Image (cartoon, coloured by chain):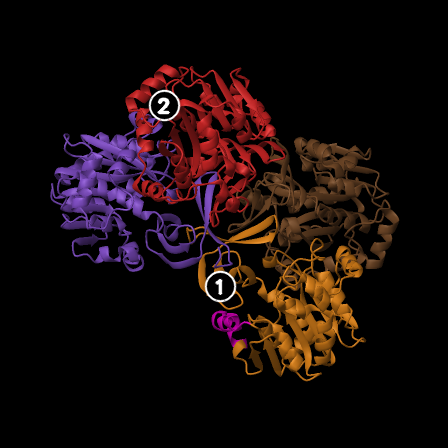
Chain colours: A orange, B brown, C red, D purple
Amino acid sequence: MANYAKRLWLEEDLGDDYRWSYRVSEVLFSGRSEFQEIDLVDTPTWGKVLLLDGKMQSTEADEQVYHELLVHPPLLHHSCPKRVFIMGGGEGATAREVLRHKTVEKVVMVDIDKVVTDFCSKHLARNTKAFADPRLTLINDDARTQLEQAPDGSFDVVIGDLADPLDGGPCYQLYTQEFYRNVVLKKLAPGGIFITQSGPAGFLSCKEVFSSIHATVRSVFPAVVPYAQHIPSFCDIWGYNMAFSDAAQTPLSAEELDARIGARLDGVPLHFLDGVTFQGLRHLNKMVRVALQEEKEVYTVDSARFIHGAGVKA
Amino acid sequence: MANYAKRLWLEEDLGDDYRWSYRVSEVLFSGRSEFQEIDLVDTPTWGKVLLLDGKMQSTEADEQVYHELLVHPPLLHHSCPKRVFIMGGGEGATAREVLRHKTVEKVVMVDIDKVVTDFCSKHLARNTKAFADPRLTLINDDARTQLEQAPDGSFDVVIGDLADPLDGGPCYQLYTQEFYRNVVLKKLAPGGIFITQSGPAGFLSCKEVFSSIHATVRSVFPAVVPYAQHIPSFCDIWGYNMAFSDAAQTPLSAEELDARIGARLDGVPLHFLDGVTFQGLRHLNKMVRVALQEEKEVYTVDSARFIHGAGVKA
Amino acid sequence: MANYAKRLWLEEDLGDDYRWSYRVSEVLFSGRSEFQEIDLVDTPTWGKVLLLDGKMQSTEADEQVYHELLVHPPLLHHSCPKRVFIMGGGEGATAREVLRHKTVEKVVMVDIDKVVTDFCSKHLARNTKAFADPRLTLINDDARTQLEQAPDGSFDVVIGDLADPLDGGPCYQLYTQEFYRNVVLKKLAPGGIFITQSGPAGFLSCKEVFSSIHATVRSVFPAVVPYAQHIPSFCDIWGYNMAFSDAAQTPLSAEELDARIGARLDGVPLHFLDGVTFQGLRHLNKMVRVALQEEKEVYTVDSARFIHGAGVKA
Amino acid sequence: MANYAKRLWLEEDLGDDYRWSYRVSEVLFSGRSEFQEIDLVDTPTWGKVLLLDGKMQSTEADEQVYHELLVHPPLLHHSCPKRVFIMGGGEGATAREVLRHKTVEKVVMVDIDKVVTDFCSKHLARNTKAFADPRLTLINDDARTQLEQAPDGSFDVVIGDLADPLDGGPCYQLYTQEFYRNVVLKKLAPGGIFITQSGPAGFLSCKEVFSSIHATVRSVFPAVVPYAQHIPSFCDIWGYNMAFSDAAQTPLSAEELDARIGARLDGVPLHFLDGVTFQGLRHLNKMVRVALQEEKEVYTVDSARFIHGAGVKA
């Protein structure tokens, strides 16, 4: 607050009757693609913030945590991840974390919006190096189309870093049982792992999409590990579902996880994640566990007909 | 939003440059004591909300979780809690949860503000029964004065349900090393357990007070178990420090905790807490664990001289 | 701000991208009728504020000015006003000002909402006396129905104190050429005067409704005097159209107006209005005068078909 | 609202408990001088808005009206204005309007902030031409220093386009009796006219500074004509005091004013001001007239000692 007088606020609805606002010290860039409005603003609270259609997508203050939890659990649980497919992830931070794994040889990142990927590769200093990494292939297209065209068994890890299924956009298709069964599972090599960001997972919010995404993943994959962590700039607990294609696989112990972090990563320690952390995150509380167990709704192409466009759960 | 047209918002600062607002559908009661302003409002987002000096104190939507975590871990870890002392807790919900334990014979609750306790005993339907329980002795006085006057070894559990130490008020005294050593520890009977709410405990916020409260409790008690949980209406992860007076005591396993919940409580199951939940909560993430380990600041009566009135950490 | 801590704000849109908020120190009463939501709140900025459907209807700080300008110009321009018909005016302040004229023998006030008139007669201290005045007949009905049923030539002054025509409600009918020609003009006795509040009349806002109301009144009455004044709580200049049924009548000079104020009123001087004031108000600025002159749109029952429900100007 | 998704609001306090907010579609430029923060933003409500220290200084929607009223009344009342001194006015619009007078040969504009004048000459398209006019001498200095150094009797019109006297800045000196008597009056040639913007002049706000500025000007000049107009982006009526150095001079009639507008200006008609308009503006309402008549406070260098820095009226 010290260094500027104007009171410029970004306001974001958190619900129908509930919103927050944070001061903007500078609007660094503004742009627009055929898909969305893109802004980069600086804020005293969150540092630099990437906005898509005016909603906080990622902040300097906490994107590291969100991305560590999206990327490292599946890669660390895999015996030797070499080929990774990222659906979405246009900001570049998901790729950045993947590329820290010494085993990784090839990353295919498919984000529909070229304006976003161009913008982020240029303006997000933390991710610039990742965009330039020769192991990365960046394709601006629909992630489903690209994944369908890949040979079966061609990826060790598939990562879903997409907008929520109920946002009213075409992302819904990428959260359906059919897509998981007919595409994702087939494209994974034996022992392959799938993970998807899974929306709000607090005890008050976990039934919005987290529980249904979990039920959908569970209906296709033999084993699913849900976990969740508070992301301050999302103003909620955030959920992830990590799915093993191999029924025999189980979560690593804290010690095993720590050992793999030490052995496989690029030498710079992880800020947030370690074995004990992951122990905490995957022991969900009773209310969320009950919600997951009781959830009956599986997202299918059929149910998409009703949801798509409305953007609200029936 | 459906059932009222006026746009009445309660606005609360979450930081210098960061605030939130939630719609108020009705102002149910407003009052004022010599200590603070007291309001009860109804909201579409949180249900009924108790405000002290305009800040959310407790909401129908999530107070259950906050209070389960403040009360049940220490009482369940105690071998047979009969006598409980509550510092603060004027709302009545802490007493309500304590009184669910069949072993409890006597609860002394000391809250300085009679207007608050009168108001809550009358207007908060969920807590009315607790206020009327014959096992409860309610005293409107300074909690320190009352605890000092109690005979040594006279309580099995002491619970701190007070405003944060840096809020600029006199509560700071109740978070000092001297108070813990000279009063709390002495008033606990052998095997006694102390717990205090400990402020924000997110990876971005845990150094505000959580880490120093932890360091202070740890400097007095032989064993301390910190844990934390997201409380949506506090817009952050919330921290607790549970301290054992007996160096030999360790956290219960999930199975033991579940067994004691089954055996000791009043028959109605806990909404939020069970053994697995507690496993999750006490495995703090790496960033918070590092902050706790590295914290050097212990609150003392001396440091209080600088902090009191300023309300900000030096 | 001094005497309360909570930050309760009433927010009102002033346009699509433009709003204001004022602090509420207390919600005094809240109610609801079949037509609208009714609230009385206290504020540091405006004193007590009456809200209908959450919008500021009248404030202690400036309602006197709005009502002096609605009532006294037409009554003072009339040679001897005895019988006055008020359409709307449920708050009671219009009647209060009318009843200050010693010549007035009978006031008929027709407001559709009994809950509002009951509420205001009880809770608005400034208007209580007016509601109890034996010269006042209060009828809760549609103003048009009642005025149609009155004998021709039975009123000296008709006052329109109604919601704006484009608010989407049935008030539109009471702003049409047909209503003015077939009802209002006929019910006025010779020398009778009609006045209607006429919406925002600033140089940026006068084309919303002010200019069309003026054109409509002018299409029926032989002489119309538009005038306007800033009403702070409406956040704009507010317009009035005063219409003479007698083509020979002209606005009074400042001296004549002052003389009539002295002779006819109840002894308490008017706060705001005098002869010089009215000179100022009826000399509209060039931009507004041009807008009035150029306005082609006359509100008719036919155009109502398109407007009603939409609430926006085609 | 149609063409952007992000909800970026500029918030401005209108009082302690009262504020407004307007959406910003784009931040066009941001800068900072040693005196203030400077921003140019685009808004759906006001078009382009110039902000100084985060407060609306001038908007595309209504700056024309503010500046017509500051410039043309004094120049039109002067018999033949050739030499004009502008105190402040860094935006350039005051000079722009002055330069429309064919009689004007020389304009000296003294604004302390070179960053503002550079910024506005470059970025405010409406004023670019004025900044380049050879009749304009722009000096970045303290306006008082420059005016003191000018020979006595060297200006026909002096225009004060400065921040309000109670804003806590050094502008207070330029509103004192001593400055008016010892500097402004002496620098005016015979028949010279002084005008100053005079702050809010509504019936609720006229005692903040308008009445005292009026009393101060009146204590020095033989004749003063106060007038006022609603400026929407200032959210209030705005006041002006025009002072004649010749006791015999009186306001022009509407016809005379219209004739001079026709004869002296550059051919493009004024948008807002004409003879009738000015008739309206200078007939102030009773509440404001009473406030002006009763005002006892004259700003002096002595009273400045108390006010300066505090920024509030004792």
* Magenta span: chief secondary structure: helix
Q: How many marks?
A: 2
Q: With respect to residue B53, does B232 lie above or below?
A: below
Residue closer to the observer: D116 or A144: A144
Q: With respect to residue D130, does D13 lie above or below?
A: above
Determine if the magenta segment contains residue A124: yes
Q: Where residue D274 appears, x then y in whole percent?
A: 25, 40
Q: With respect to residue A151, does C26 lie above or below?
A: above
Q: Dot 1: few (<14), some (14–19), or many (≥20) neighbours within 10 Å?
A: many
Q: Where residue D262 appears, x then y in whole percent?
A: 19, 45
In the picture, measured across the screen, residue D58 lies left or right of residue D81, that is: right
Residue D302 seen anywhere in this rendered image of the structure = no
Name the residue tied to disc 1.
Answer: A40
Magenta stretch: give its range: A113-130
What secondary structure is marked by label 1? strand
Mark 1 belongs to which amino acid? Leu
- Given contact means CB atoms under 8 Å apart, are the residues at marks 1 and 2 in contact? no
Q: Where residue B219 appears, x then y in whole percent?
A: 67, 52
Residue closer to the observer: B131 or C233: C233
Q: With respect to residue A10, does C122 lie above or below?
A: above
Mark 2 belongs to which amino acid? His
Q: Dot 2: few (<14), some (14–19), or many (≥20) neighbours within 10 Å?
A: many
Query: Viewer-nearest of labels 1 and 2?
Result: 2
Query: Disc 1 is attached to a residue of which chain?
Result: A
Labelled disc at residue C155 = none
Res D255 quadrant in image:
top left
Residue closer to the observer: C308 or B87: C308
Name the residue tied to disc 2.
Answer: C77
In the picture, measured across the screen, residue C255 lies left or right of residue A178, that is: left
Q: Looking at the image, which residue is at 80% across and 47% down? A: B75
Query: Disc 2 is attached to a residue of which chain?
Result: C
Determine if the magenta segment contains residue B292: no
